[in-house]
Image (spheres, rainbow, N blue to C red):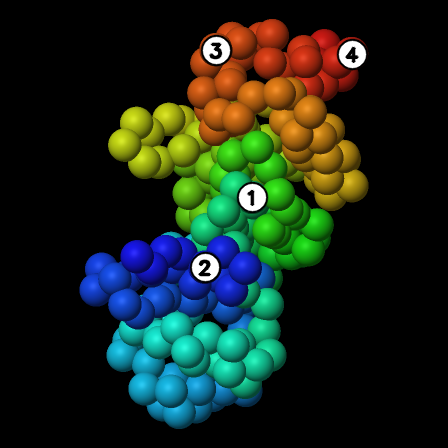
Amino acid sequence: MKKDILEKGAILQRDRETYAIAPHIPGGITDTATLRKLCDVADKYGVKELKLTSAQRIALFGVKEEDLDAIWSDLDQQPGAAIGLCVRSVKICPGTTWCKRGVQDSVSLGLKIDAIYHAMELPNKMKMGISGCMLNCAETMLKDVGVVGTPKGWRIYVGGNAGARPRIGDLLVELGPDEDKVLAVIADLVEWYRSSGSEQRLGRVVEQMGFDAFKTAVLGAKATP
């Protein structure tokens, strides 16, 4: 019986014969040349459908197994981490680049986070979201790690998820506008999670430990204002 092919970023579909793949598009930001290439490849290999995904990618559906290597070669793009125990996606809103409501540069910060963490192997899957204002257009509160821009800087939330048992993330720390400080906190958080010994989703870890204990474990002395 056919299964997902993790090393090729290929997810077996309902027909149990064909696959879906999704090239990585950091923050969903692309250009016309890349879009044309996607269309050309889809036409060349008879891809049945292209779909915009919630992870800000363009997925190709109905891909034949024997075409996977050739398609990836023609696309010349990194697979999006749509499967596996890793950082699956980093969702980014337009922030101050375009949005009239943006108060912090979510694109700048989000692309840095994506470059560091996308596809990083972890004990369980992890999703991240970066929103440039409190409207949370990147669905930040439903991410394992969510960063939200405020007029004063950034808030980092942890333990959110959608799924069969949705959970709203907890506020871990509130920072100024310095992106490096946000990156440092996320680095501490991810490193703690990797070495925690738990194989559960981050929100379940928070629930089992209790949020205060979790915060102290991750931030140490920095947990105290």
Circles 3 and 2, Cβ within 8 Å, touching? The answer is no
Query: Does dot 1 land on a helix, a strand or a loop?
Result: loop
Question: Which circle's residue, 3 or 2, is located before the other in the chain?
Answer: 2
Query: Does dot 4 land on a helix, a strand or a loop?
Result: helix
Residue labelled with disc 1: 86
Label 1 neighbourhood size at 10 Å, few (<14), some (14-19), many (20+)? some
The answer for how far apart the CA atoms under marks 3 and 1 are is: 21 Å
Against 25, residue 32 (above or below) is: below
Residue labelled with disc 3: 208
Q: Position of residue 61 (x, y in %)?
A: 32, 71
In this rendered view, identify the residue nearer to me: 215 or 10.
Answer: 10
Q: Position of residue 124 (x, y in %)?
A: 52, 34
Against 46, residue 137 (above or below) is: above
Circles 2 and 4, Cβ within 8 Å, touching? The answer is no
Query: Does dot 2 land on a helix, a strand or a loop?
Result: loop
Question: Which circle's residue, 4 or 3, is located before the other in the chain?
Answer: 3
The amino acid on which the numbered mark 2 sits, given as a three-letter code, is Ile
Residue in the picture at 52% in, 41% down: 85
The amino acid on which the numbered mark 3 sits, given as a three-letter code, is Gln
Q: Position of residue 105 (x, y in %)?
A: 63, 52
| Foreground: disc 3 or disc 1 | 1
Residue labelled with disc 2: 5
Q: Position of residue 17 (x, y in %)?
A: 27, 67
| Foreground: disc 3 or disc 2 | 2
